[in-house]
Image (cartoon, helix red, strand yellow):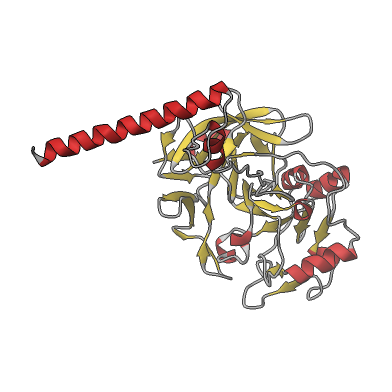
Amino acid sequence: MSTKKKLGIISGFLVAVVIAAVGYVVYLKFSGKEIPAGEIAFTVENTEQALPSEKTTEYVDPHAGMAENPLTGKWIKKSEARKRPVAIMINNIREAIPQSGISKADIIYEILAEGGITRLMALYSQYDGMDKIGPVRSARHYYCDIANEYDAIYVHYGQTKYAVSKMNELHQDHISGLDYVDGTIFFRDYNRVAPHNAYISSDGLELGIKTESISKKHTKDVPSHFVWNETSSKPENSKPCRQVTLGFSTYTSPSFVYSKNEKKYMRYQYNMPQIDDRNNKQLAFTNVLIQKVKEWDIDRNGYQTMKLTGKGKGYYLTRGRRIPVTWKRDSQGITKYYTKDGEEIRMNKGKTYIAVFPQDRGGEIVFE
């Protein structure tokens, strides 16, 4: 007999023995008889006991005790989320370049002032350890209005009469460089020509807040401006957008070029990268918002005013894509941004640039 046949016979025999044993155990089980000592005890109970016990793991919230930073969407301690941001007016003409400390801002607004120049307002949720921020320049009433949306402490060096009226109307907490002797809260960098050489630091901000008896924490609920994606994503129904140029005037046309490596829009101004001289970093933004508004001269001096209430059109850029948006300032005085379907846009977490742009210069917004 061949080896193959012998193995087949042995295998068949073993299978038969196992089946007989199992049948015997089942018979004893259902007949109520005990299984004799030394016999095979292959029972359902024993089988269940042999299986590993299932372990249940309790869900642990990775963001317990934390809150989203209302300016960036990033997770921070709840106590920090109650801290009021500061909104600092930043000089943006050629003589003020390079600026200091602006790469640390969470949000930067840019709006026309007069004579075709723009001024920036930098919003900081955290400003510890900063030795130089600026150059700081004078207030404009529409910037007062926007700073108030965030319940921000408004910081400026000088102001128009329209800004004074607006701050009084809003009962706005603010720190003005004209109220103090240079070298106390604000200081001068004499390597530059005035008025482009006034700066403030973290220590100066703290002293100004203390001197003016300003609360550092929100004393009222401040609704969020933005809805955040938990993970970075591209907007639905979006178009490619490698670059955008904003023709504010013949004097200034800043541009933003998308970096695939950084997944951010890098800012250029006056035909060169816009750099923060405290760390030599180029300004970079995860989000770019363009809010088109009706804008006009308020007087013969060319001071500007604009309609920030109601609604209007604009664009949202992120991850190298763009979509059209509608902006609305709601009943709580907060400006929000919506898709064409009427849903609030979902923004990617990170720094944001917002251009409040004259709608009659819409043709000067160039996408590439």
- Using the image as rendered, state which of residue 320 and residue 359 is in the foreground: 320
Q: In the image, is residue 139 above or below residue 28?
A: below
Q: Name the spot of residue 150 as percent of width and height, x first.
A: 75, 45
| Residue at x 70% of width, y 70% of height | 129
Extreme residue toward the left, this view: 1
Q: In the image, is residue 158 above or below residue 263?
A: below
Q: In the image, is residue 113 above or below residue 233?
A: below
Quadrant holding the N terminus: top left
- Using the image as rendered, state which of residue 183 and residue 43 is in the foreground: 43
Quadrant holding the C terminus: top left
- In the picture, residue 33 is in which quadrant? top right
Q: Name the spot of residue 361 as percent of width and height, x first.
A: 53, 36
- Using the image as rendered, state which of residue 268 and residue 240 is in the foreground: 240
Q: Name the spot of residue 182 as percent of width and height, x first.
A: 79, 73
Q: Is residue 35 left or right of residue 310?
A: left
Visible residue check, residue 340 = no
| Residue at x 76% of width, y 47% of height | 144
| Residue at x 58% of width, y 71% of height | 278
Q: Is residue 64 left or right of residue 338?
A: right
Q: How many marks?
A: 0
Q: Name the spot of residue 300 as percent of width and height, x first.
A: 70, 44
| Residue at x 82% of width, y 41% of height | 221
Extreme residue toward the right, this view: 213
